[in-house]
Image: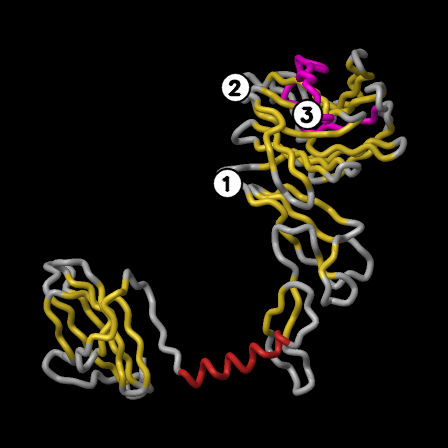
Amino acid sequence: MSGDVLYVWRANIANETHTLATRYNTTSGNWLTNHQTRYMRQDNVKVRCVAANKDVLFVTETSIQTRKTVLRNGRTRLLLSSSVLSCSSMVYVSKARRSIQEETDDVCSDSTCSHICVLTPVTHPRAVNYACLCPQASFLTLGTTATTCSEPKKFAIIADMNTIKMISLDEGAQDQGVYTLIYGPSNSYYVGLCLDRSADRLYYSDITSNVIFTAELRTRNSSVFHRSNVSISSLALGGQRLYWTCYDARTLKGSILTQSTGGTSDRTRVVVTNLYQPRAIAVDVDSDGRGYIYWVEYGQGASGVPPRVCSMTTPSGPVTVLKHPGRSSWPNGLAVIGFWLYFADGYTKSIERMDRTGEW
């Protein structure tokens, strides 16, 4: 478009022999030429992109025979470039516009941002027309100064589809944005997640590939911790060991397994089996592996074992059913805080609380 004139190219799709250009006045609503409103006709080419600057028109033409794309002056047919690979859209930018942008970019060169500076709209003459950001895929957020990126002291880490994300919980922090720590393949679905704070190491499970990964929090270099042939749901750490729930998607039968996080040759061990779609897990054990394990199970549906909240003493104590929340229940998240046990119900959209013996 140039001024009030809109240029329209119509390709003959049926036989692909020519492209017809027309002009339309957007103010009067009239076509500007006679002879079938034709402005320019070119045989054996297709026009993909158009840009205008005052009276100069720029077009890309793709030859029907050779499939080669070139850039031309739309009226004089002057060849401007023959090295155009492909085009889906085009815009003309003048040298004056670039000089204005270069002058504006100087604002960031004088900024106090520690990492990334981006331009922002000017709201009043004395306003600072830039903002500071921290890089994605880094363990950094903006502190109280809003200019310096640093590691947060308090934070939350979230598994979100094929990404692991982090948000700062520090008081007075200027940045409440969500930062992506780890990008996984597009077909990944991360569900289990836990953090070993003593080693600043993440553990997370991918339910699509049945793999548990581990990654250093700051470098984010990941490696495979455990491979399985069944679905891995939830993870928990306790006594320098990783515990996880898993189940067969066909039979819904599941187990709780454990393995040392110390980098030894310790093999995976079965903690308890004959569970029914075990989901969330929480662990309260000492360095010797003695203590309690809590978990929730979806059950087998209306005709089978109902959903339940269970516990057991480790290393090999009996399983105790603490609660049957009811068949209309989807017990998911689970947490142990002091003497209390909390679990999230996806069906009722509520968080329930009980003591460690199962009393409400």
| Residue located at (67% from left, 13% from top) | 273
**Whether residue 134 is situated above or below residue 351 in the rendered picture:** below
Quadrant (top left, top right, bottom left, bottom right) of the N terminus: bottom left
Residue 33: percent from left, percent from top: 16, 85
The dot on residue 185 is 1
Quarter of image, res 354 = top right
Q: Nearer the viewer, mark 1 or mark 3?
A: 1
20 in relation to 220, above or below: below
Residue 276 among magenta residues: yes
Q: Quadrant of residue 145?
A: bottom right
* Residue type, numbered disc 2: Arg
Give the x, y percent position of residue 238. 79, 27
Relative side of 329 to 20, left or right: right
Q: Is any part of residue 296 visible from this angle?
A: no
Say which residue label 2 marks. 250
Stretch in magenta:
261-285
Cα distance in 3D space between marks 2 and 3: 19 Å
Residue underneath mark 3: 244
